[in-house]
Every structure is written in C-alpha cells, then in structure tokens.
Image (cartoon, helix red, strand yellow):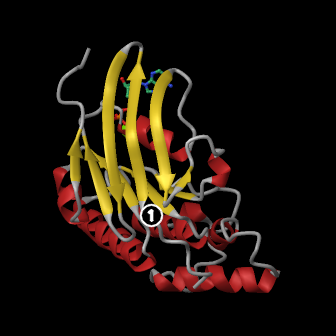
Amino acid sequence: MLEIPETRPLTLSDVTIRLAERTLLAVSATVMPGEVLTIMGPSGSGKSALLAFAGGFLDPAFDASGRLLIGKEDLTNVAANRRHAGILFQDPLLFPHLSVGGNIVFAVPPSVRGRETRRALAERALAEVGLAGFFDRDPETLSGGQKARVALQRVLVSAPHFLLLDEPFSKLDTALRQQMRELVFSRARAAGLPAILVTHDSADAEAAGGAVIEIGGEAKP
Ligand code: ADP
Ligand code: MG
C-alpha cells in the first residue's frame, strides 16, 4: 500500500547483554525477510532488554555488546528513530488524545504528502483489518482485539524495515490470541519483513513457525 518496504535480513551478531556483571543472554542469528525468529525465555530473562537493544533504547543500566545489522547496514549506533523498527508491545499503546484514524495517520511517513492522501492510507489500513468506518472513533471505545489490530496497522503503515514483537499476544484472551498471531505473522510475511518475537509462551513460537532460541536457562558467570 505504501512504497514496498526494503526487505533485507536482520542480523544479531554476537549480541550479549549483561546486568550487574551477570550475563542475561548471548544471541547470534540472522532472520530472513518474511521470517520470524522467536526468542523464548521466562520472565526476567532479558527478552525486553534484547528488543530494546535492537530498537536502540536499551536502558544504560544494562551492558550490551555485539551488533545489529539490516542487510549489510550496521544499525548498532544508529538512533532509535532512524532504525525503521516496527515495534509491538503487550499493550496496544494507542494515543488517547487522537482518534483511531489519527493514531494511524501519525505513523504514515512524512514522505507521504497531503492530508487527504494520508487519511486515505489510514482508512485503507483500517479496512484491511475489518475496521472500515472506525476512523473517527475514540480508541477508548474499542475492544481489546480491535485496539490490537489498530496497533498492528499503525506499525505497518510506518513502512518499517523489521519488526520487534514483545509478547504482543500475552494479554489477549485465547481465541483472540490465535487470531492475532495469524494476522500479525501473515502480514509480516506478506510485507517481507524479518521479525523477532520474544515470548514465554511456546504456543507463540509454534504459531510463528520459524527458528526458536531459548534464553535464561541458568545464570551464567
Ligand atoms: P523479560 O522481558 O524477559 O521479562 P527484562 O528484559 O524486562 O526481562 O528484564 C531482564 C532483567 O533486567 C530483569 O531481572 C529485570 O528486573 C531487569 N531490569 C529490567 N529493566 C531494568 C532497568 N531499567 N534497570 C535495571 N534492571 C532492569
Ligand atoms: Mg519483557
């Protein structure tokens, strides 16, 4: 719908994250366009820290080494807002002061010009996930599943180069969770985006259908 996003592999090269002298995780992996790498680990194992490293917003309390690459481009020292990461968290985090459509228009890249064009893009994005006619709604009036779909479309209209998924299904009820998994993974595949999913739920890993790396087995010196 927008310009075709660049689809290059995403590489974590010898990424090690430490907290207070303790190694939380050490990961090396390449994720091909349209594929999902799942990082599985219990609560506190450093899953969110790893995505924060990849997104460029890791808290300085952590010590990280290693590199993040998209294709051959090294993003390790690139500012978060220039990495073109599409991020989904457990909560949809819609802006409460904007309409549903406003939340999506906000994410349309500035290179797409003209109020009407930007609005039309957002309307199409809503229609794609069964939310035609929801543009002017207050996000607060949406169900959990509807908010999750708006959050997904907000990420996708931003034309990301890769996806970072931080347990985005964990707060949805069972039936909805399966639907959202299918929607997120099929849209990521269709857009040819490499994705890293972190989760403690092995059913997420199964649904993602890609490689799985387990972290946080035991504390390393
Ligand atoms: P997960 O997402 O796997 O549950 P996190 O990446 O959030 O784990 O956290 C990994 C570890 O780092 C946990 O022990 C957590 O308490 C700690 N931690 C998280 N954020 C910070 C921070 N800003 N400063 C210090 N420690 C943190
Ligand atoms: Mg977490």
Residue shown at 37% from the left, 54% from the top: 196
Mark 1 is surrounded, within 10 Å at the Cα level, by few (under 14), some (14 to 19) or many (20 or more) other residues, namely: many
Judge from the rendering whether residue 199 lies leftward or rightward of residue 127; answer left or right: left
Q: Locate residue 30: give its quadrant.
A: bottom left
Q: Position of residue 164 (x, y in %)?
A: 44, 54
- Tell me: residue 103, above or below residue 186: above
Residue 38: image x %, image y %? 28, 53
Q: Amino acid at mark 1?
A: Ala
**99 or 181, which is in the foreground?**
181
**Viewer-nearest residue: 139 or 123:** 123
Residue under the image location 17 percent in, 56 percent down: 203
Which residue is more in the foreground, 129 or 61?
61
Q: Nearer the viewer, residue 129 or 65?
A: 65
Task: Identify the image quadrant of residue 32.
Answer: bottom left
| Quadrant position of the C terminus in the picture | top left
Outermost right residue: 114
- Percent coordinates x, y for residue 2 in the rendering: 61, 81
Residue 44 appears in the figure:
no
